[in-house]
Image (cartoon, helix red, strand yellow):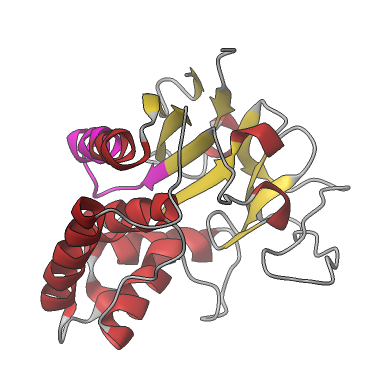
Amino acid sequence: MPRIILDIGDIMDGFPSYRVAMVVAENLSIPAERSAEAAYFLDKTEGELRAKLEGADIAEIPEIKAWRAAYRAFGVKKTSYRSSVERLLKTIQKTGALPRVNLLVDLYNTVSASFRMPVGADDLDRLAPPLAYRHSRPGDSFVALGDEGRTPNPPKDGEIVYADSEKVLCRRWNWYQDARSAIGPGTRRAVLNIEALEPTPDWRLEDAAAGLSGLLAAHCGAACRWGIASKDAPRVEV
């Protein structure tokens, strides 16, 4: 299969500690029903996360503080715009449960919450690579996931976005996903990104990528490969 390119060079000057582990998963099979093994894993992880987050001040978690600072640095001041990992941790703390969407999404949410890093996924067959994290541009298009009216909602000037060659895939860095590349039951190939800032060390990002790959292989039959984009190598091919 062709290699997938991800480039983060456009935002490196402002965020030199930023890194992305891109996982490419092929031969996926997302089952309609979770196996006993998958259900056990999700329930066990959910219980562990619930216990760790009980009474915690999520805003004071070092990884969350780093993402809040990064959002402020590119102009996001409203508290309604938070990183995907902060919103996930708050959901677990409030409800005591991991969201259940489909098994692929459920699995990457366990990695996101456990490692305290934003994780997202797109259907590779709905993408037009190359992919990039970059500042918004005139003409960028975005349609919010869940918007049944498919109302255009383009990014503001200066936003950091995740995009392919045709459209924005996620607005405000990792705040909200576009509808046009969403994972569904029929997804057979996916690109999943795990994002890190200081104080997260490189080895922890590598562990997250390896762990996610193992989960997708074990529970979705996926063949995975991954690589990391960083300041020293902002363009990665996987």
Q: Is residue 11 above or below residue 89?
A: above
Find the magenta span and give its range. Answer: 194-210
Does the magenta run of residues contain 187?
Answer: no
Q: Position of residue 12 (x, y in %)?
A: 51, 36
Q: Nearer the viewer, residue 12 or 195?
A: 195
Q: Is residue 218 left or right of residue 237?
A: left
> In this rendering, does residue 184 appear at all?
yes
Q: Is residue 32 left or right of residue 5?
A: left
Q: Is residue 204 above or below residue 177?
A: above
Measuring 77% from the left and 56% from the top, which residue is drawn there?
142
Q: Position of residue 160 (x, y in %)?
A: 62, 51
Q: Is residue 237 left or right of residue 117?
A: right
Q: Nearer the viewer, residue 226 or 56?
A: 226
Q: Quadrant of residue 61?
A: bottom left
Does the magenta run of residues contain 206?
Answer: yes
Measuring 57% from the left and 28% from the top, which residue is drawn there?
7
Q: Nearer the viewer, residue 40 or 181?
A: 40
Q: Is residue 106 above or below residue 201?
A: below
On the rendered image, what quadrant is the N terminus found in?
Answer: top right
Q: Position of residue 222 (x, y in %)?
A: 39, 31
Q: Position of residue 44 (x, y in %)?
A: 14, 64
Q: Is residue 184 above or below residue 205?
A: below
Q: Quadrant of residue 124?
A: top right
Measuring 21% from the left and 56% from the top, which residue is drawn there?
36
Measuring 55% from the left and 80% from the top, which residue is drawn there?
80
The tally of labels here is: 0
Q: Quadrant of residue 86?
A: bottom left
> In this rendering, does residue 12 appear at all?
no
Q: Is residue 27 left or right of residue 187?
A: left
